């Protein structure tokens, strides 16, 4: 049975990191939910108002991710974290395009709680998933929106399975291979936290996300939180 594990080296470098997991199975991700779209638009508007005139790089929910990126050799100006990317788009008045209900709702939750959120289709995952530092010979991966595959750089944080990276630079950009689509039935979502985001705040975001998946996509949902004392969880919801 497929599991998600955080390598001990990650917690050595980032001891207070928390990874919330929503594993789901048997969901209906087809079509567009007007209610989820409305929630996403409301969160975009709220973020636009909240970040107007604010230095986004210095915001307490953005700055820790920029520091983490620099710590593993990435330039956050060129490769912003997923939450910084969402906030910057919202601050410019840009609307996120509809991808699927799951993607729309996790983007809404990400903006609402100002934490990175992402997800993968379990049917496209090979073997177990690990959050780890990239090695010297990682296979090339084609990221969403990119024409050619490129290998992760040694030392950057990646999610990977037996084939290769699922997401590069922790939460910068996901692989096309395991993306969530309208055909997705089984998969998992991750909610990531670095201080000053505390466990209670992560639990609130994780609960919000799980309830939205149950409410709008049906299926079975299970949650877990990974930390330095509990670094692994199964990715099957049943």
Image (spheres, rainbow, N blue to C red):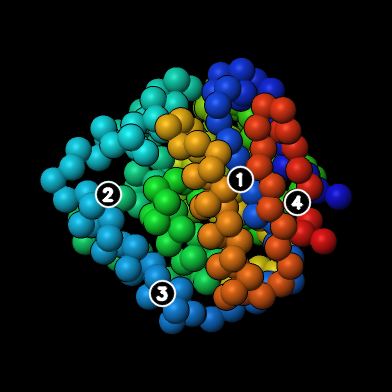
Marks 2 and 4, how far apart at CA: 31 Å
Q: Nearer the viewer, mark 3 or mark 1?
A: 1
Q: Quadrant of the C terminus?
A: bottom right
Residue 9, how many percent across, how many down?
65, 20
Mark 3: few/some/many CA within 10 Å (<14, 14-19, 20+): some
- Side (left or right) of 148 relative to 130: left
Marks 1 and 4, how far apart at CA: 12 Å
Mark 4: few/some/many CA within 10 Å (<14, 14-19, 20+): many
SS for tag 3?
A: helix
Disc nearer the start of the sequence (2/4): 2
Residue 169, how many percent across, how many down?
49, 35
Residue 49 vertical placement versus 198 (above, below): below
Dot 1 and dot 4 residues touching (CB under 8 Å): no
Residue 174 vertical placement versus 46 (above, below): above
- Numbered mark located on residue 20 in the image: 1
- Side (left or right) of 98 relative to 233: left
Q: According to the image, label 4 marks what residue?
A: 235
Residue 46, how many percent across, how many down?
27, 60
Residue 141 seen in the current view: no
Q: Quadrant of residue 149?
A: top right
């Amino acid at each position: 049975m497929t599991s998600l594990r955080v390598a001990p080296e990650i917690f050595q470098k980032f001891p207070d990191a928390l990874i919330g997991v929503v594993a789901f199975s048997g969901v209906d991700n087809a079509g567009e939910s007007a209610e989820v779209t409305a929630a996403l638009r409301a969160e975009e508007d709220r973020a636009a108002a909240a970040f107007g005139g604010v230095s986004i790089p210095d915001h307490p929910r953005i700055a820790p991710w920029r520091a983490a990126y620099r710590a593993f050799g990435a330039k956050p100006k060129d490769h912003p974290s997923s939450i910084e990317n969402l906030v910057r788009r919202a601050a410019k008045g840009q609307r996120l395009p509809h991808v699927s209900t799951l993607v729309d709702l996790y983007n809404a939750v990400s903006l609402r709680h100002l934490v990175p959120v992402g997800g993968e289709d379990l049917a496209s995952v090979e073997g177990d998933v690990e959050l780890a530092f990239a090695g010297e010979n990682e296979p090339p991966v084609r990221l969403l929106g990119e024409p050619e595959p490129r290998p992760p750089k040694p030392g950057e944080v990646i999610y990977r399975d037996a084939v290769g990276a699922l997401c590069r630079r922790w939460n910068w950009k996901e692989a096309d291979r395991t993306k969530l689509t309208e055909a997705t039935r089984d998969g998992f979502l991750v909610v990531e936290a670095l201080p000053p985001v505390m466990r209670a705040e992560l639990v609130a975001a994780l609960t919000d996300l799980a309830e939205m998946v149950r409410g709008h996509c049906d299926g079975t949902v299970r949650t877990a939180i990974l930390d330095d004392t509990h670094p692994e969880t199964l990715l099957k919801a049943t």
